[in-house]
Amino acid sequence: MNDSEATTTDFFSLGGNDERQALSRGELLARVTALIQSCEGCENVGVAGVTPLDRPDTAGCNWSYTLVLDTAGVPPEVYGLAYAHVIAMARSSWNLE
């Protein structure tokens, strides 16, 4: 069913299915950055790098839990909570192309 008045986009489409969307490295970094920046106190934190895996893990994700962050001076206790909040959701939704 097509809802022409729907306000959501697939940019932040997380969960809801078992198939991950394949993204370029740049798009994956942009989306994970946007998720982290949506967390309180992390508006300037950026994701600078992602570690690809040689093959998908047992959950089917092909990139690591390890991200390179540009913390922009945000304390670890703040960006650490944001990281923990978004990483599992992002890994369950997106794969690297």
Image (cartoon, rainbow, N blue to C red):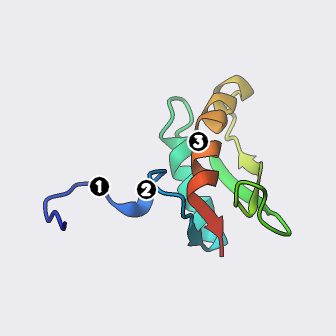
Question: SS of the residue at dot 3?
Answer: helix
> Reading the chain from its start, which is encountered first: label 1 or label 3?
1
Q: Is residue 45 above or below residue 75?
A: below
Question: SS of the residue at dot 2?
Answer: loop
Q: Is residue 90 above or below residue 11?
A: above
> Reading the chain from its start, which is encountered first: label 2 or label 1?
1
Residue 33 shown left or right of residue 48 in the figure: left
Q: Which residue is mark 1?
A: 8
Q: Nearer the viewer, residue 47 or 51?
A: 51
- Real-space Cα separation, disc 2 to disc 3, in angstroms: 13 Å
Q: Which residue is mark 3?
A: 86
Q: Is residue 89 above or below residue 77?
A: below
Identity of the amino acid at label 1?
Thr
Is there CB contact under 8 Å for labels 2 and 1? Answer: yes
Identity of the amino acid at label 2?
Ser
Residue 20 shown left or right of residue 51 in the figure: left
Q: Which mark is residue 13?
A: 2
Give the total of numbered labels: 3
Say which residue appears at 55% left-offset and 57% top-offset: 93
